[in-house]
Amino acid sequence: MSIEPGLVLAGMLVIGFLCQWLAWRVKLPAIVFLLLAGLLLGPVLGLLHPDRLLGPLLFPMVSLAVALILFEGSLTLRFHELPGIGRAVRGLVSYGALLALLLLAAAAHVVAGVAWPIALLFGALTCVTGPTVIAPMLRTLRPSARIANTLRWEGIVIDPLGALFAVLIYEAVVSHEQGHTAGVFAATLACGALVGALAAWLLGFLLRRQLIPEYLQNYGVLAGVLLAFVGANTLAHESGLLTVTIMGIALGNLRGVHIDDILDFKEHLTTLLVSLLFILLAARLSWPLPGHLLWEGVAIFLLAQFIVRPLTVVVASLGSALDWRERALIAWVAPRGIVAASVSALFALRLQALNVAGAEALVPLVFILIIGTVVLQSATARPLALWLKVAEPEPHGVLIFGADAVARGVGRALHEVGFRVVLADDDHDGIRRARMEGLATFFGNPASPYAERHLDLSGIGRLLALSTHRERNTLACVHYRQEFGRAKVYRLRVLAPEENTDRAALADKLLAPPLFDETMTHARFAELLARGWRIKATRLSATFGWTHFVEQYGSDSVLLFGVEERGALRVASTKRELEPRAGWTVIALVPPPAAL
């Protein structure tokens, strides 16, 4: 029975979304669920047949999707950030990556018996981690700041560099198989680099001069990337992937070109493309795999996990500030992701069309390594980090934007009941006072690029914007939504409700939930503190509940926070009214005894 193609494509979109959602819920990289969904729909149940569904469009669609994925990954590389990433990261993304490439290639050649050209290509593809698999794993792992920064920067930097390694080796293999001379290979590389650089310069010129309206910039960049990819392939066969990789690196480093919105769009588009692409590619696999490939793939995975990665980290981190515990965890964590899976499938399609020996083994070996590293490391990395004593606590801490009396009072109250609190502000006097009161501080704007590099957020899971600057509070809330989630950022009103007219109001989509009750503003909070009101923490019990607290301290008392028995912090806001229960610790603003 044939299924309507439109229904199949719509079903793939829904299944891809469910895989991404499930990955978010369980805090695992989505690639595992997408690959498993493809295997289930394709070879296991026989419901999805990509070659039959797309026919001659399969290869062009996969090619264009991979081109966009490589471009998006390459956009993230910033040359000016490389000197500050630390000795260990520089080692991991340079001679460490080269060592891993050679060792993985040797493993594929010796264990699986594939020819050296395919083995080297396998090594180039699988020496790469990447932000899409590292970021969700770090959210679950929560290692110390030094480990997290090392793994994060390794993924960011090696993603485009690994893609470049893979493309160069692929070009060499194809050129050799087609009988091309070294001159033709050099011409292919030159064409890819030249077209990529020219396309990046042209796009940068148009964007810098605002010759493309803002609402068309994402569309224009998307069209430009695909045109450069196809144009380069037309000029020099198979040079398109190198073109988009060079184009992304060049555009991301052009001065005066703001690409944040473009990068956001490309990230969203990549999520969609990855979801469809991995389901399609996994559905094309033969299942069960031939016995020799399955066991050879498992053997290569074990070598990669227990020999190649530890040896690479030891060599790359020589002379760095990392201690042995930090090196041990970094040596364990190296999940493979988007570049390895998507690019290997595209290369395999092309190499099999050229009848290259061993090309049929490339995708199964890569996919076994991906699934093995992600599943094993996701299940064991957190216990290992705890055992090594390099894991951070649960992210229950609070980042407070502001350092005046209100911010210091709130921060001190939360600190006294056991929460990690960091006050961030560029008010030198306020920060000095906070330090004298024993609070952790960060001198600077918490939404600045400097804060992204130097503000330690380990153990921090919420933002309270308590400064007197309304717009900067809003900016901080928008910035930290991506870090903590929309439900974990709050602001203290600066304007009273009657002052916040339509002319003065900010757009709803920019605003975080207001803190405390309907009448509370920063000015009122500061005035109450000046009049002798104090922030009081009290543990409730079955015999002394919230009603008793209000009777004792006055009906004017303002509930600020509640701390549940298991230690979770609940924030009082106009969007969520708290109902304190027995066993909670309540933090409230109460009037002075003389006013009762």
Image (cartoon, rainbow, N blue to C red):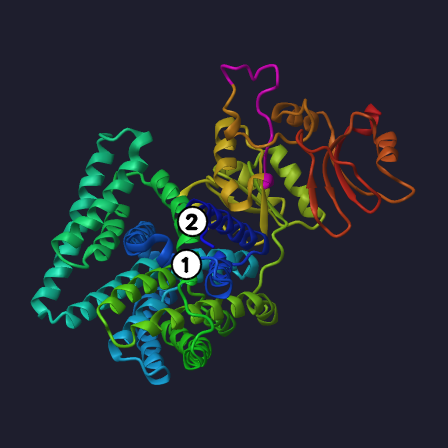
Residue 489 inside the magenta-drawn segment: yes
Decide if residue 26 is on the left or right side of residue 236. right
Element type where label 2 sits in the image: helix
Around disc 1, counting alpha carbons within 10 Å, would you say few (fewer than 14), some (14 to 19), or many (20 or more)? some
Q: What residue do we see at 19% from left, 59% from top?
A: 238
Q: Where does the image place residue 12, in percent across and percent down from the top left?
A: 46, 50
**As drawn, which residue projects farthest toward the right?**
543
User: Which of the two labelled residues, at mark 2 and mark 1, occupies the earlier sequence position?
Assistant: 1
The answer to whether residue 354 shows anywhere in this view is: yes
Q: Where does the image place residue 334, in percent across and percent down from the top left?
A: 44, 67
Magenta highlight: main SS: loop
Examine the rendered structure and indicate whether residue 272 appears above or below residue 32: above
Examine the rendered structure and indicate whether residue 329 appears above or below residue 461: below
**Residues drawn in magenta:** 487-504
What kind of residue is marked 2? Thr
Q: Where's the C terminus, which quadrant? A: top right
Around disc 2, counting alpha carbons within 10 Å, would you say few (fewer than 14), some (14 to 19), or many (20 or more)? some
Specify the quadrant of the image occupied by residue 527.
Answer: top right
